[in-house]
Image: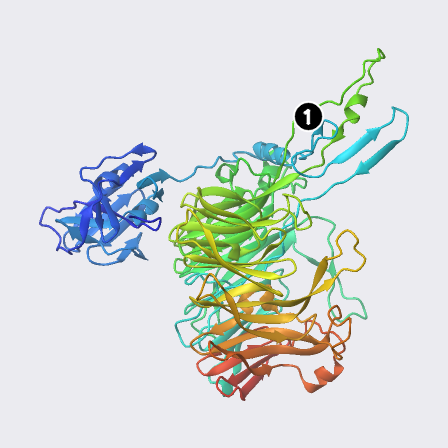
């Protein structure tokens, strides 16, 4: 029986005038006559019935290709198939999984082969290449080929203003009969004594629960002999403040990028510094590969096109100050691409910009994708020329700049801007993509009225998630009226009713985009109840989308208390399966999807770790749970049966004087905790090892940013930056609520295996003895704070803004150091 991970293959009879291709025989063929195909919602009949070959469905190519508008031809000399539709050309060679689209190399899901003299190639690849959406329904054994979802265009500036005005309409509650409840939320009671008398207001209102702050974490280990950024999905790179190519270190260091020769460690030196002084550009993150350095940052300028205005230096001033302009400022996301063949003199190749604030980015091979949010408000109009409405419309349109095309910002035409009909967002989401190897190819830019908050990307798709608040409506009902015979006072009777407070139901809306060689295309959208924590709440596996959410409020004790859920969706983001009501009264602190399993940590007073089975996507089930003190902010895979949790220890303390609930307790977080969970017996997860670091107040960037982790199972290496706070005199009655005093900042380096657990090998700091003596009870964001740890060969490097230190990876003895020149 086929599963939802079915890979579809198209069958084609492709011949040339001079012969037939050499056969590549397939085995294990069986009948697939019970498999149905629909094309754009209608049953599709081909000249031959489908076949199953080693669990793969084969269907006729020529009929489907022509139905999709493609021409099929055979190149006998190259033994290849060419598919042509408009400007898209695909070439597939029999016997090879390597293919090409528009000259760019691609990898097929299956090797093209022959069955009975008929050529077979992957349907999903062909369908998606020609803007079709392929889905599989295991229940009905149906392959559906559909068009991508079409979105309406904003069309004009006037229509934009109408859309924004509609989105800004307040979502107030409605009048309900006295004693009634609007939805399941709280309400506001309004009592009016008389027209001239004073009014008594007894209000019980609540605001929607905001999503918890993001805590991001991941996996990822380079195949080469150096560490890579810890990323969520293998093959999908994420930007960071520090990266290496195995010989050099690239670091965002204040308003510049420092490139350092790291090998050999005893001869480290700064190769070059890319400075941005005097510019409005501020670098934030970067990417590096064998050919390119990409620096991502933000710029700001006046809405009228001018930049920041430096003020003349005062007579006793040593630095320039900036006048805060009394005018709107526009921000952009900028990516600057450098050729780094010569590390001592990086050559700028290209600049691209998107209006708005930076949301996220991804790099897949040579393809770079940027996502930005821009306010779509039109209160300020930077009118130029004669100040005509056309100028106002142009100045309020989202714009982009691509130095490969023009040095000027180019506004998008409102006819090319799409909007999500049910969205109440008043921001644009801009998605830009470039192919780093194709400098002549303009940036692909699309804009949507509807923002994105959290981003997940696989190698083929990008998902943007945004929280949506929907009002819970109730039918209005007038308050009972007594017939006194007196003239009615307009509005008075209406005010005697109870008015329901604004009550909302939260949803997460997910927008799906197809990624292809630096270009994006909107595919579809879907939604699920509740809100997500961060990018790790989302995952794609074998074409299916999985997402974990929290719905409700932790403080409530009725049916609207917080509950945690997991949903699966098909390729079209249609509901497939769900598991709801996990850990009532708690919220999600971390999630990790690993193949056919998901691991979820929730917390209120204790830390339940739930193991969830996703083998049948239509029916997720809880396999087991472990409840222990503390919580994990980030879960990282160790192997298929073990995972590492990074978070905080907690202590429960009884609440004194609570007569309503004498047993009530409050959990106070303590120091940082690292746990190794054993899920070999998935029904009974075990905390196999744990390690405590410091006391209350201890912090690590790793707890909110997965990129701060260095992990290599093969090298038995685990390291991360940490600021340690310790209580001088433990054991007092108030030690659980007391904060520690500063004792250390730097890198904790561990060995980790399944026999010995966590073994602290070294604590590496960039602080001097004088720094430590001067430190008081707290610490600050010093230039000596270790930000990242990475390795190249047999050397471990720790980096702060002021220093790079190299240690032998085996002995951890220092091999060399380099002070980074400051401005």
Number of other residues with Cα within 10 Å of mark 1, as a class: few under 14, some 14 to 19, many 20 or more: some
Q: Is residue 101 left or right of residue 250?
A: left
Residue 506 in the figure: left or right of residue 120: right
Quadrant in the rendering for residue 394: top right
Q: Give the x, y percent position of residue 476.
A: 68, 25
Q: Is residue 442 visible?
A: no
- Of all residues, the one furthest to the top in this rendering is 485
Place residue 800 in its image quadrant: bottom right
Above or below for 713 versus 3 = below
Q: Measuring 57% from the left and 32% from the top, which residue is drawn there?
A: 159
- Examine the rendered structure and indicate whether residue 406 appears above or below residue 262: above
| Relative vertical location of residue 282 with respect to residue 306 in this rendering, above or below | below
Residue 579 in view:
yes
**Residue 327 x %, y %:** 71, 48
State the residue in front, 131 or 750: 750
Depth check: 154 or 217 in front? 217
Count of numbered badges drawn on the protein: 1
x, y percentage for residue 217?
Answer: 53, 63
For residue 740, side relative to residue 397 (left or right): right
Residue 470: quarter of image: top right
Q: Is residue 115 or residue 528 the one in the foreground?
A: 528
Query: Circle 1 sits in a helix, a strand or a loop, which is it?
Result: loop
In depth, the one of 422 and 411 nearer the eye is: 422
Q: Residue lying furthest right in this view?
A: 197
Taking the spot 83% from the left edge, 18% from the top edge, the residue there is 489
Q: Residue at x 56, y 54 (%)?
A: 359
* Residue 300 at x, y percent in the picture: 63, 55
Q: Quadrant of the C terminus?
A: bottom right
| Residue located beneath label 1 in the image | 476
368 vs 724, left or right, is left
Which residue appears farthest toward the left when viewing the image?
A: 18
């Amino acid at each position: 029986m086929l599963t939802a991970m079915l890979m579809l293959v198209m069958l084609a009879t492709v011949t040339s005038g001079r012969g037939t291709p050499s056969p590549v025989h397939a085995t294990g063929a069986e009948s697939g006559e019970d498999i149905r195909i629909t094309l754009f919602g209608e049953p599709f009949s081909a000249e031959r019935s489908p076949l199953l070959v080693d669990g793969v469905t084969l269907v006729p190519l020529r009929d489907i290709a022509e139905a999709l508008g493609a021409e099929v031809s055979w190149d006998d000399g190259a033994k290849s198939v060419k598919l042509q539709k408009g400007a898209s050309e695909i070439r597939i060679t029999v016997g090879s999984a390597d293919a090409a689209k528009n000259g760019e190399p691609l990898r097929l899901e299956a090797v093209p082969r022959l069955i009975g003299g008929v050529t077979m190639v992957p349907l999903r690849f062909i369908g998606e290449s020609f803007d079709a959406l392929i889905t599989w329904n295991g229940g009905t054994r149906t392959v559906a080929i559909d068009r991508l979802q079409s979105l309406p265009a904003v069309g004009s500036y006037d229509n934009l203003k109408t859309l924004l005005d509609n989105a800004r309409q307040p979502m107030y509650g409605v009048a309900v009969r006295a004693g009634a409840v609007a939805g399941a939320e709280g309400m506001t009671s309004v009592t009016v004594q008389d027209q001239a008398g004073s009014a008594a207001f007894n209000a019980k209102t609540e605001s929607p629960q905001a999503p918890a702050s993001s805590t991001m974490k991941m996996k990822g280990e380079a195949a080469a002999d150096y560490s890579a950024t810890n990323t969520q999905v293998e093959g999908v790179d994420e930007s960071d403040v520090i990266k290496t190519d195995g010989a050099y270190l690239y670091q965002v260091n204040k308003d510049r990028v420092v490139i350092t020769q790291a090998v050999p460690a005893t001869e480290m030196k700064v190769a070059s510094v890319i400075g941005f002084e005097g510019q409005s550009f501020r670098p934030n993150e970067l990417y590096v590969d064998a050919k390119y350095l990409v620096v991502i940052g933000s710029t700001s300028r006046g809405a009228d096109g001018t930049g920041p205005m430096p003020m003349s230096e005062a007579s006793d001033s040593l630095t320039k100050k900036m006048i805060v302009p009394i005018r709107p400022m526009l921000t952009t996301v900028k990516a600057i691409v450098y050729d780094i063949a010569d590390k001592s003199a990086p050559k700028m190749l290209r600049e691209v910009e998107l209006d708005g604030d930076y949301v996220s980015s991804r790099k897949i091979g040579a393809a770079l994708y940027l996502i930005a949010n821009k306010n779509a408000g039109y209160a300020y109009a930077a009118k130029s020329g004669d100040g005509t409405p056309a100028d106002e419309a142009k100045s309020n349109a989202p714009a982009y700049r691509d130095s490969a095309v023009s040095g000027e910002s180019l506004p998008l035409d409102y006819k090319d801007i799409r909007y999500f009909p049910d969205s109440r967002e008043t921001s644009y989401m801009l998605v830009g993509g470039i192919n780093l190897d194709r400098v002549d190819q303009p940036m692909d830019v699309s804009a949507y009225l509807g923002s994105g908050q959290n981003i997940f990307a696989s190698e083929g798709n990008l998902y943007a998630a945004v929280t949506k608040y929907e009002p819970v409506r109730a039918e209005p009902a007038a308050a009972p009226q007594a017939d006194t015979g007196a003239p009615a006072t307009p509005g008075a009777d209406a005010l005697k009713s109870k008015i329901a407070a604004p009550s909302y139901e939260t949803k997460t809306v997910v927008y799906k985009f197809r990624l292809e060689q630096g270009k994006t295309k909107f595919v579809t959208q879907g939604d699920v109840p509740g809100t997500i924590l961060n990018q790790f709440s989302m995952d794609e596996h074998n074409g299916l989308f999985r997402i974990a959410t929290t719905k409700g409020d932790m403080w409530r004790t009725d049916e609207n208390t917080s509950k945690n859920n997991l949903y699966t969706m098909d390729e079209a983001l249609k509901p497939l399966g769900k598991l709801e009501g996990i850990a009532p009264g708690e919220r999600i602190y971390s999630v990790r999807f690993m193949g056919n399993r998901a691991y979820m940590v929730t917390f209120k007073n204790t830390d339940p770790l739930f193991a969830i089975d996703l083998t049948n996507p239509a029916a997720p089930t809880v396999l087991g749970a472990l409840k222990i003190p503390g919580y994990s902010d980030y879960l990282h895979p160790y192997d298929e049966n073990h995972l590492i949790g990074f978070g905080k220890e907690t202590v429960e303390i009884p609440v004194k004087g609570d007569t309503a609930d004498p047993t009530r307790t409050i959990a106070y977080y303590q120091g940082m905790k690292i746990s190794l969970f054993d899920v070999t017996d998935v029904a009974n997860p075990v905390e196999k090892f744990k390690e405590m670091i410091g006391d209350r107040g201890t912090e690590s960037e790793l707890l909110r940013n997965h990129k701060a982790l260095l992990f290599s199972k093969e090298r038995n290496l685990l390291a991360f930056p940490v600021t340690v706070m310790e209580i001088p005199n433990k054991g007092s009655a108030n030690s659980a609520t007391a904060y520690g005093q500063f004792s250390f900042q730097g890198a904790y380096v561990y060995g980790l295996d399944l026999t010995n657990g966590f073994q602290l090998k070294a604590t590496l700091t960039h602080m001097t003895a004088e720094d430590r003596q001067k430190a008081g009870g707290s610490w600050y964001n010093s230039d000596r704070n270790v930000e990242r740890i990475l390795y190249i060969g047999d050397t471990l490097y720790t980096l702060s803004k002021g220093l790079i230190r190299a240690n032998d990876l085996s002995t951890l003895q220092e091999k060399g150091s380099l002070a980074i020149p400051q401005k």
